[in-house]
């Protein structure tokens, strides 16, 4: 009885496997990580270090992925962000790799891997035998030390002109190259350009910088009581007793309303080849070349064969002075052909010059017009054949009746 | 005419000649444009099996008028692998002969942006970006940024399913089922392989164990019972040595798979998972 049952089950297994594996054809699944090696030197026991990896794919559709660590360093590593990780061809994800070794670990060199993996694309339900997960690794090496290292460098110092009644802002970029948290001291002495008398002075030591991280410290100093004109500011940066840097920066104190708002639309970029129904992401690269923080919004007009078919716009975002931001708008083409996106960015009551980009839209796979033409021809031939048959049938009937 | 007058006339003539020579000389040889410090995207993280746009920017100055600046072009290359004058090669050398001039800062200064669409298999190395500015008189100025790091990218592409086809209970695959792996990065890769049992929650007789799935990543057409490795739940290293792409076609290779079906098994759909992980080539 049992043998019979197994035989029966066996006999239909062939059929069931045929069904089970009649899944849609395989698609490509890609993932990458950069850099492929991370090295952290002289990390203090119980200390902190940080770096970044970029995770990417060539998949046009968004792909979820997971990130984790393996090896001896597995328990020391955190990721930021660690959830809702999605990538697509034009959207690589930067993930911070944070190293926090325990305080009681022995000095030495420890290794491990960072592993990123796609979610399995086809499992369960109507899927085939094995869904595939694609993954990749970045090798990680951490050198642990018990020696405290206090080391930093000043990467940049700058000051911007300001207007009467507004504070003057100094930007100092400091990179913590050691393995302990540092709190650098910044001092500023302002005098007239070519003058010697110090008219204003200020100290700042409120920002703590974690090991391996760079911080851009913004330090504001009031200008009340200062006349219009050109000034010199002697900026010094100290780490404990050590002077890291000293520089004289020059700025102008201007009349109110002098400073300009100036933005440039550098480029409009989108995927140039898409299918009908695809959502096209249109990125506008806007650079704030002015002297004041502005908010910008991209507005674009989409034309097909010279006719306006849609107006698209992005969210409004703030563009810091000297920075380039990406303003994204979205468009879903409904017909094949070439589309032209003409757009500009509106910021602070001004508009940039108009730039263009092109979208070439192909008919969607499986919707080739040729197929419809063939179907129509086939239908016509069928109708024609039926008509001839009917006519022939009627003729034969009439002949029979005559006889 | 007295000597004094003669000397005066002669001196004036010499002065005028010198002035004219200098003036004509200046007119004929305007100062070449100056390219300020070049800034570049650094480091560069490449995009798996795709491209990434990077920038080299600088301020171009002309002593008299920025409008004298005619064209700006740039070369981005890996100096350890090729030379600046070499022809373009996606692994080692890129040029942009139409860099964009933006709105001028002043009468003499204008920013220029040069972009490069860099392929995923560009060499991981320290590259150099050199920008040239040419004025309407045909003179040129240039400046470079060295040590622009292109980071290593370890990446792969696999087919998202492995379809073993129709098999009877107790049978083993006779033909390979291939899964093609593409190197989507700029370093050589090996593989770690692991998987799960092929299961169905309703199965009471048997599932298909992970070890029933076997592979050979180098040689096709191997017998299921010989020269094939059983898949394991724990990642297992496989020496695949798939080089990075060069300018030819994709760098790809097949992995070869077979399955063995238990003799007693129910009429259900059995599914599982196989993981391909790119690891460092050793």
Image (tube, rainbow, N blue to C red):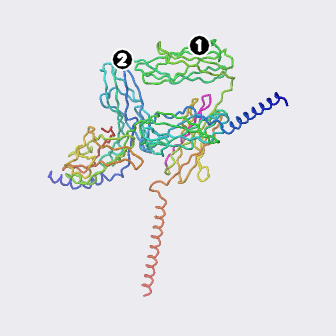
Q: Is residue A112 left or right of residue A199?
A: left
Judged from this view, the residue extending furthest toward the right is B1
Q: Nearer the viewer, residue B202 or A39?
A: A39
Compared with A231, B6 (above or below) is below
- Our reading of the magenta stretch's main secondary structure is strand
Q: Secondary structure at mark 2?
A: loop
- Real-space CA distance between mark 1 and mark 2, rounded to the nearest whole angstrom: 36 Å
Which quadrant of the rendered structure holds the C terminus of chain A? Answer: bottom left
Residue with the mark numbered 1: A201
Residue A79 position by quadrant: top left
Residue with the mark numbered 2: A147
Where does the magenta region start and end?
A277-296
Q: Nearer the viewer, residue A167 or B212?
A: A167
Q: Is residue A224 left or right of residue A395?
A: right
Residue drawn at (25%, 53%), measured in percent from left and top? B221
Chain letter of the residue carrying label 2: A
Residue A52 position by quadrant: top left
Residue A219 in sight from this viewpoint? yes
Compared with A100, A91 (above or below) is below
């Amino acid at each position: 009885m049992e043998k019979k049952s197994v035989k029966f089950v066996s006999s239909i297994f062939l059929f069931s496997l045929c069904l089970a594996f009649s899944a849609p054809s395989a698609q490509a699944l890609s993932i990458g990580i950069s850099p492929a090696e991370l090295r952290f030197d002289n990390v203090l026991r119980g200390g902190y270090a940080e770096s970044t990896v970029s995770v990417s794919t060539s998949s046009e559709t968004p792909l979820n992925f997971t990130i984790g660590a393996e090896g001896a360093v597995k328990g020391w590593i955190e990721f930021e962000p660690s959830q809702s990780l999605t990538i697509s061809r034009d959207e690589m994800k930067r993930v911070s790799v944070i190293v926090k070794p325990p305080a009681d670990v022995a000095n030495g060199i420890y290794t491990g891997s960072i592993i990123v993996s796609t979610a399995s694309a086809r499992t369960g339900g109507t899927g085939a035998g094995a869904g595939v997960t694609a993954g990749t690794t970045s090798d990680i090496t951490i050198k642990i030390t018990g020696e405290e290292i206090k080391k930093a460098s000043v990467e940049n110092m700058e000051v911007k002109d300001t207007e009467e009644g507004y504070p003057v802002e100094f930007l100092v970029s400091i990179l913590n190259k050691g393995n302990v948290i540092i709190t650098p001291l910044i001092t500023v002495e302002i005098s007239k350009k070519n003058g010697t008398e110090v008219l204003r002075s200020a100290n700042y030591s409120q920002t703590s910088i974690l090991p391996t991280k760079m911080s851009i410290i913004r330090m504001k100093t009031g200008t009340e009581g200062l006349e219009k004109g050109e000034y010199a500011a002697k900026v010094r940066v100290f780490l404990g007793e050590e002077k890291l840097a000293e520089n004289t920066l020059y700025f102008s104190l201007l009349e109110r309303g002098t400073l300009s708002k100036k933005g440039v639309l550098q480029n409009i970029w989108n995927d140039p080849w898409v299918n009908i129904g695809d959502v096209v992401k249109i990125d506008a690269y806007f650079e704030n070349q002015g002297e004041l923080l502005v908010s910008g919004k991209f507005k674009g007009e989409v034309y097909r064969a010279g006719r306006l078919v849609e107006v698209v716009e992005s969210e409004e975002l703030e563009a810091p002075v000297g920075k380039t931001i990406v303003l994204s708008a979205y468009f879903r083409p409904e017909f094949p052909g070439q589309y032209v996106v003409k757009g500009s960015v509106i910021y602070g009551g001004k508009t940039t010059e108009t730039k263009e980009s092109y979208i070439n839209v192909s008919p969607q796979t499986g919707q080739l017009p040729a197929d419809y033409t063939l179907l129509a021809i086939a239908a016509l031939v069928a109708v024609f054949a039926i008509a001839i048959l009917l006519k022939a049938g009627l003729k034969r009937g009439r002949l029979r009746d005559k006889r | 005419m007295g000597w004094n007058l003669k000397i005066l006339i002669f001196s004036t003539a010499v002065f005028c000649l010198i002035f004219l020579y200098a003036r004509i000389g200046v007119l004929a040889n305007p100062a070449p444009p100056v390219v300020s410090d070049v800034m570049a995207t650094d480091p560069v993280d490449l995009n798996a099996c795709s491209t990434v746009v990077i920038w080299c920017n600088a301020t171009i100055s002309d002593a008299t008028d920025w409008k004298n600046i005619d064209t700006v072009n740039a070369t981005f290359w890996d100096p350890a692998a090729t030379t600046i004058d070499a022809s373009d090669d996606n692994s080692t050398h890129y040029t942009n002969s139409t860099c964009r001039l933006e709105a001028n800062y002043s009468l003499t200064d204008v920013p220029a942006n040069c972009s490069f669409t860099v392929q995923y298999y560009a060499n991981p190395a320290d590259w150099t970006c050199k920008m040239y500015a040419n004025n309407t008189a045909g003179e040129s100025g240039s400046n470079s940024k060295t040590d622009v790091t292109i980071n290593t990218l370890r990446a792969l592409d696999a087919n998202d399913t492995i379809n073993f086809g129709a098999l009877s209970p107790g049978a083993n695959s006779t033909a390979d089922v291939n899964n093609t792996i593409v190197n989507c990065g700029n370093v050589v890769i090996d593989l770690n392989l692991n998987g799960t049992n092929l299961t169905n929650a309703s199965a009471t007789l048997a599932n298909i164990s992970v070890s029933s799935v076997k592979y050979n990543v180098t040689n096709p057409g191997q017998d299921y019972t010989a020269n094939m490795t059983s898949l394991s739940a724990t990642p297992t290293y496989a020496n695949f040595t798939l080089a990075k792409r060069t300018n030819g076609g994709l760098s790809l290779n097949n992995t070869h798979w077979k399955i063995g079906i238990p003799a007693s098994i129910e009429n259900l759909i059995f599914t599982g998972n196989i993981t391909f992980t790119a690891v460092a080539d050793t």
